[in-house]
Amino acid sequence: MSEKDPYAENPVIAWREGGIVAIDQTLLPDEVRLLRIDTVDDLVDAVVRLAVRGAPTLGAAGALGVALAAHQARRSGWSASRLKAEIGRIRDARPTAVNLRVGVEEVVPALADGPEAAGRAAVAVVDRIAAANRRIGERGADFLVEACGRRPLRIHTHCNTGALACVEWGTGLGVIRSLHERGLLDQVIVDETRPLLQGSRLTCWELDLVGIDYRVVCDGAGPFALQQGLADAVVVGADRVAANGDVANKIGTYGLALAADRAGVPFVVAAPESTIDPATETGASIVVEHRAEEEVTHFRGIRVTPAGARALNYAFDVTPADLVSAVVTEDRVWTPRS
Ligand code: MRU
């Protein structure tokens, strides 16, 4: 970790004095600012505008959100049905990442014992989410050394799957950091990840923090970089993995999986068990979030299309299981296509 560990003072997300604190990821890489979240409105707003984002971190937000709602209910004298409705707003704030729902559902049973009990249950969920990432990282690194050989590897990644997205360490970026720790990482290729640039803003920031060498590419260059043999493997995260192994992840992942298959390099999905959704049979039933057209027609507030242009803004895509070499979790390596 470079000289100043930003997480020491600013946790990615945490419970603090009856409320939530979280790094505002929309301000990175230029500013590390901690948000104070004391109401359900504030939390839903932070989730919807991606100040708090990334599947495992959304799981933590869901868990902490139940405790937050319980405290607000007591402060505001909410009825049980009002509390239930407010918790439903948190659960449904974004549709694709199953972790948000899982986090909420893990803490709701603790409500019967009061807001403090819900707070303790939520903190336990957050600690478990954080602890799983190291195991994912090590298991993923083992898989890649097996698949690619014991040598410094070049890894291509998409979106942000580091501590910011996972509370600590990271899933996809956790695998990359585990390789780095072992001296088995050469370089990382990072897709910028339009339209909100989670790759160029967040992943590059995290890689700088730990002194890992990388090159950022525009998303359109990703498949060509693979064709040119610039990477030994692709490692990404996931927002929902269906029972058959189809994977929903940030828009642009599917194209990278096709290019990896064509280039004959492993395409590895790193995700906690909580991202695997047995209730979703195949990718066809995964709800893909559509976001505001302005995220595509404008860049940092500047319109980049003719006035009145319309856009399609898929936030995620679905990669079929037959393009996935392995789904690596804290407990197993699952190879859906074999
Ligand atoms: O819209 P975002 O930034 O929340 O999307 C995040 C991703 O798609 C990540 O790859 C995924 O959540 C896995 S994070 C470990």
Image (cartoon, rainbow, N blue to C red):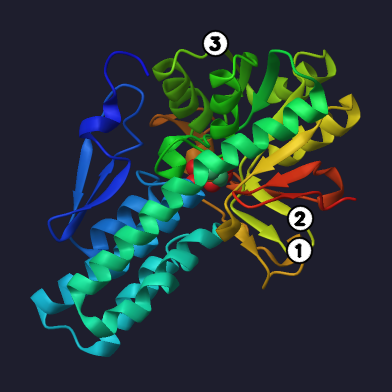
Q: Secondary structure at mark 1?
A: helix
**Across the whole image, how many numbered discs are drawn on residues?**
3
Q: Residues within 10 Å of mark 3 (few under 14, many from 20)?
A: some
Residue 8 pos. (x, y %): 24, 31
Q: Is residue 274 above or below residue 305?
A: below
Badge nearest the viewer, 2 or 3: 3
Q: Is residue 177 above or below residue 215?
A: below
Quadrant where the N terminus lies?
A: top left
Q: Quadrant of residue 220?
A: top right
Q: Amino acid at mark 1?
A: Ala
Q: Residue at x 89, y 27 (%)?
A: 264
Q: Residues within 10 Å of mark 2 (few under 14, many from 20)?
A: many
> In the drawing, does residue 281 fall left or right of residue 105?
right
Residue 229 pos. (x, y %): 82, 14
Q: Secondary structure at mark 2?
A: loop
Foreground residue, 322 or 335? 335
Badge nearest the viewer, 1 or 2: 2
Sequence-wise, which precedes: disc 3 or disc 1? 3
Sequence-wise, which precedes: disc 1 or disc 2? 2
Confirm or deny contact between disc 1 and disc 2 (CB under 8 A).
Answer: yes
Q: CA distance from mark 3 to mark 1?
A: 37 Å
Q: Amino acid at mark 2?
A: Asp
Mark 3 sits on what residue?
213
Q: Which mark is residue 328?
A: none
Mark 1 sits on what residue?
284
Q: Residue at x 44, y 47 (%)?
A: 131
Q: Quadrant of residue 60?
A: bottom left
Q: Which mark is residue 246?
A: 2
Badge nearest the viewer, 3 or 1: 3
Q: Is residue 249 above or below residue 69?
A: above
Q: CA distance from mark 2 to mark 3?
A: 31 Å
